[in-house]
Image (spheres, rainbow, N blue to C red):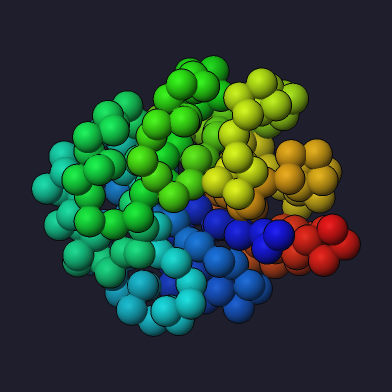
Amino acid sequence: MKMHIKICGITTLKVAKAAEEAGADFIGFVFAPSSRNIRPSDAARIANTLSPNIQKVGVFVNESLEEMERIANIVGLDMIQLHGDEPEEIAKQLSYPVIKAFSIDKVKPEKITTYPCEYLLIDSPGEAYRGGSGKTFSWELLDELQIPRDKLILAGGLTPTNIQQAIQQVRPVGVDVSSGVETNGQKDIKKIQTFINNAKQIERLN
């Protein structure tokens, strides 16, 4: 199974190009309160320089349908990630494919089976902002949820060091990283390259 790799919290062209060249499949722009928030105009400038083969994902938290569609159109997004408490009705109305993120401490099995989305992203409980804390959670909890592995994107505390163990144990279709490829709060190109290389190496072995 091909491993889809998402580098989230992109704020500069240099980092976006490095992620693309290293083999990332998705990059994420955060349009919600976050230390990695980016303006739509800046995201559009970055997105316009990238290959159409890399999927541009906009991350939103409890945003209005109209605003998400407006920003997606400006930036040229390929997918929308809903990282808040968005009801199923919002996902159904969006004219873009959806990644629905759930915190491991809040996700309910019945929600997973009915939510209209391409992928289910499971993250660690958030701290200062909605979204992950940059810490891992107990991956065994995912077995209880019975998420189809071809829909599961694993997030939360992933790093170049633990990514191979995570893929071997969880066997998701995708992995998502942000703070795990940063140094002092800034994206670290070397860490991005190592993370992607390690993830692709374990993919080839399986």
Residue 112 visible in the current orientation: yes
Residue 102, how many percent across, how many down? 47, 30
Query: Would residue 133 appear left or right of 47 to someone viewing this image?
Result: right
Q: Nearer the viewer, residue 38 or 185?
A: 38
Residue 132, how many percent across, how many down? 52, 33
* Rendered view: 57 above or below 22: above
Q: Residue furthest right?
A: 205
From the image, which quarter does the C terminus lie in? Answer: bottom right
Query: Would residue 106 appear left or right of 203 to someone viewing this image?
Result: left
Q: Quarter of the image holding residue 64? A: top left
From the image, which quarter does the N terminus lie in? Answer: bottom right
Residue 176, how many percent across, how many down? 58, 49
* Rendered view: 5 above or below 138: below
Residue 188 visible in the current orientation: no
Name the residue rendered at 37%, 73% in the picture: 46
Name the residue rendered at 25%, 43% in the picture: 92
Say how many tags the image has.
Answer: 0
* Rendered view: 32 above or below 205: above
Q: Residue furthest left?
A: 66
Q: Quarter of the image holding residue 111? A: top left
Query: Would residue 169 appear left or right of 10 to someone viewing this image?
Result: right
Q: Nearer the viewer, residue 142 or 50?
A: 142
Name the residue rendered at 42%, 79% in the picture: 52
Query: Would residue 84 appear left or right of 118 to someone viewing this image?
Result: left
Name the residue rendered at 55%, 57% in the picture: 7
Residue 113, how many percent across, how many down? 46, 31
Q: Nearer the viewer, residue 175 or 145?
A: 145
